[in-house]
Amino acid sequence: MMAKPLRQASLLAAAIFSIFASHVMAAENVAIPAQTMDPALHAKLPAEIQKSGVMTSVNNGSFPPYEIVTGSNSLDGASADLARALGGVLGVKIEHASVSGLSGILSGMAAGRYQMGIGPIGDYPDRQAKNDFVDFVKEFVVFAVHKGNPQKINALEDTCGKRIAVMAGGSAEQVIRKQSALCVKGGKPAVTIQSYADQPTSILAVRSNRSDAFFSSQAPLTYFVQKANGQLELTGTGKANGFGDIFQGTVVPKDSAVRDAILAGYQKLFDNGTYAIIMKKWGLEENMIAAPGINLAKVQPQ
């Protein structure tokens, strides 16, 4: 009895991999300017990194079009391009490692295994207690649903009694849990919250009809919807959906010695136009901000 669901899941997983590959091939036609090491920025790095010439960035799986994991230690997407450019101005090589979930990123950095998570990862005041965020994009949170929106999910209050996929440990999960409590308080069915470790698995749950919607960042959801051959659509756009201004960026341990070097490196990429080229290459013009900054988020999701 399990053979058919497993076969369907395998076919959908293969389709998602094909989506990644086709988008990467199209984006490869855009040239990213080569960067030259800035000695002043290199000098901002800790001595051990200057000596090794390597920094390790950690991710928790594909978050397209920013992070598209192509192997256990390889990455493509806007963040991969940004990491290469950042490494160029800092005079180091930025390598990549993948772990499971946001908690894996944060615990791995706290243990000293990784110096940074290129992200972008959501910057919120409660996360700033133990981490610093070098923000470089803004974001919005919406729903990806089946074409035609058969479950009529257009806002948070429409999720009562519905199956909603979210990223495990993320801010959207917190918001949907609060909404579920409001549903019950109002005499409506609770939200069935389905927490997944990464974006592809979450969108796969919707496409395979195991979830009614995926509640997550608009940039990756736009990417998935555009590549879903008309099977999906976005809803809840233009609404707060439990959030205020959302900033996302590279996460580092609190007061890390690499924080200011990363900020200065990003600022140079903003100033020389490389940031804009990368963002436009991956269709992320709407997510650009005027300048990078540290811990720009001031409001916790409701």
Image (spheres, grey):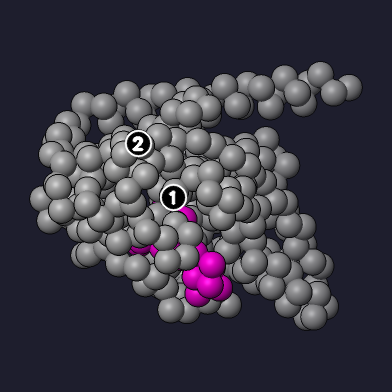
**Residue 199: horizontal and vertical position, in percent?**
56, 43
Q: Is residue 206 visible?
A: no
Which residue is at a point 40% across and 34% down the rendered structure image? 95
Identity of the amino acid at label 2? Answer: Ser
Relative height, residue 40 to residue 132 (above, below) = above
Which residue is at a point 38% across and 24% down the rendered structure image? 22
Give the side of residue 74 with respect to residue 34, left or right. right
Q: Secondary structure at mark 1?
A: loop
Which residue is at a point 48% across and 29% down the rendered structure image? 73
Q: Is residue 129 visible?
A: yes
Which residue is at a point 57% across and 22% down the rendered structure image? 14
**Residue 141: horizontal and vertical position, in percent?**
49, 61
Task: Find the distance from the CA under tag 1 to the CA under tag 2.
Answer: 16 Å
Q: Nearer the viewer, residue 94 or 19?
A: 94
Q: Which residue is mark 1?
A: 116
Q: Which residue is mark 2?
A: 52
